[in-house]
Amino acid sequence: MAEELTIGFRFYPTEDELVAFYLRNQLEGRSDESMHRVIPVLDVFEVEPSHLPNVAGERCRGDAEQWFFFVPRQEREARGGRPSRTTGVGYWKATGSPGPVISKDNRMIGVKKTMVFYTGKAPTGRKTKWKMNEYKAVDETLNFSTIPKLRHEFSLCRVYITSGSSRAFDRRPVGSFQTERMLTSDVGVAETSFRVGSSPETSMSGGEHVDLSVNTEMVDGLTEPMWEWEQLNWS
């Protein structure tokens, strides 16, 4: 029988904690049953978004705002192909530019991509309120000067529904290190400076969001960031 949780219990991680602790432990084989009761392993791209809350970790299944999953690399990715983002009724489409995940000590530890779910077939699908943040960790065993190398064995996905009001995870108190600042030489990604500001749509760490000025190109009929696909080698 599942352990009964205290009323009001919430899994309430920052982006730093998601990448530096949860995703890093999963990548290094240090995760266990207790962690998977919060973040299970699941290929979210094989499941319709409306079904994901029912297969979330048992400790987060009652959450009405967000759900987390470790997503293994697809077999087609391992063979050098592009991952499938299509379900039975629609597809996930990347939106905006990828952004770095910054640790408390001002290091780039990962990258975040935001996706929106569309019903129907590309490029004429209908946009829904389902959104996802996909996190990948930087390979810290390698030294990089401009373009980081990402770990692809697992990503960590946060699925949520866009709402017209502020969500609880957007209202998390902001620490002093998260105040608006300019990240320049400390974070070298394609020699680009990152400005950290406020964004209630994509925030995880108390409203922190990173805007990157990048060019875009058409990939498979969809607009994707050049920096993400060409320089970062996301997939």
Image: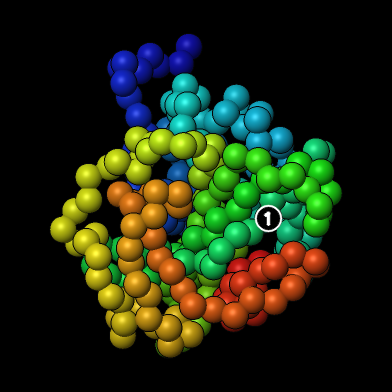
* Residue drawn 22% across the image and 61% down it: 179
Which image quadrant is residue 172 in?
Answer: top left
- Quarter of the picture containing the C terminus is bottom right
Give the labeled residue for mark 1.
Answer: 93
- Give how far across and how far down residue 146 sits, in percent: 46, 86
**Amino acid tagged 1:** Lys
Which image quadrant is residue 90 in?
Answer: top right
Specify the farthest residue to the left. 176
* Residue drawn 60% across the image and 59% down it: 95
Q: In the visual, does 226 lie left or right of 60?
A: right
Near-viewer residue (196 or 40):
196
- Give how far across and how far down residue 70 sits, in percent: 55, 46
Q: Is residue 87 visible?
A: no
Q: In the visual, does 34 lie left or right of 177?
A: right
Q: In the visual, does 230 lie left or right of 172?
A: right
* Residue drawn 54% across the image and 79% down it: 214
Near-viewer residue (165 or 202):
165
Near-viewer residue (223 or 45):
223
Q: Residues within 10 Å of mark 1 (few under 14, many from 20)?
A: many
In the image, residue 157 sits, relative to residue 208, either above or below, namely above
- Give how far across and how far down residue 149 sits, in percent: 53, 75
